Image (spheres, grey):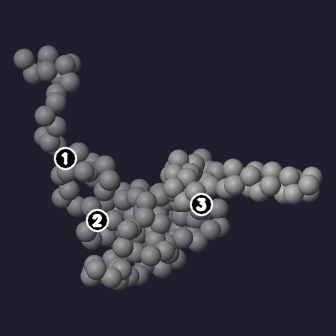
Amino acid sequence: MTSFYFLTINYIYMCVFLATLKQCVFRKKNYPQIGFTRTPALGKRRPQVKGIVNKVTTMSPKKPNSAVRHVAKVTLTNKLRVTARLPGIGYLCAKYNRVLVEGGRANDLPGVGYTLIRGVYDFSPVIFKKKRRSIYGVDRPDGLSKYVRKCIRRKQQ
């Protein structure tokens, strides 16, 4: 009788500790994996890493999209090799150029999880860009700012 009682208690404990499908889905959302990162090549506390371009090529995107996307194979300073996309229209980037790499994947390019920052080191900024200039490494053109500092306003009067 005791062995049967012990088996039933074990069975009850097993039933208590098993998770339902709903609980599994819930846990996946609310408990992210510890130590998981989408940009392992950057390391733990580095937002950007310097690298040297090995090859500049083009890729075609995944199924519903159709285009020619420009990507670069880059060797980082920590000796890891990554594939990064070249943002913007037109670029001057060749082999052995120094570039700055940040995280940010291209949704329709498999295996491309990094982006090059324009206007830093040897990677050219986008020409004639007025909006979203910080992403493309463009300086503010003369007369573009609407705000004028107080000290300059006083001199103008």
Q: Look at 39% across and 64% down and name the residue there.
A: 123
Q: How far apart are marks 2 and 3 (CA)?
A: 25 Å
Q: Look at 32% across and 53% down and name the residue there.
A: 135
Q: Which residue occupies the extreme left position in the image? A: 157
Query: Which residue is disc 1 drawn over?
Result: 141
Which quadrant holds residue 148? top left
Q: What residue type is labelled 1?
A: Pro
Image coords of residue 80 (percent x, y): 62, 68
**Quadrant occupied by the N terminus:** bottom right
Q: Which mark is residue 40?
A: 3
User: Judging from the image, what secondary structure is the residue with disc 1 in?
Assistant: loop
Classify 10 Å Cα crowding around label 2: few (below 14), some (14-19), many (20 and above): some
Which quadrant holds residue 126? bottom left
Classify 10 Å Cα crowding around label 1: few (below 14), some (14-19), many (20 and above): few
Query: Which residue is disc 2 drawn over?
Result: 88
Residue situated in front as seen by the camera: 7 or 92: 7
Indicate which label's residue lies in the foreground, 2 or 1.
2
Work out whether 99 lies above or below 12: below
**Quadrant occupied by the C terminus:** top left
Q: Look at 51% across and 55% down and name the residue there.
A: 22
Residue situated in front as seen by the camera: 127 or 135: 135
Looking at the image, is mark 2 or mark 1 earlier in the sequence? Answer: 2
Q: Is residue 46 visible?
A: no
Q: Which amino acid does label 2 sit on?
A: Gly
Indicate which label's residue lies in the foreground, 3 or 1.
3
Image coords of residue 25 (percent x, y): 52, 57
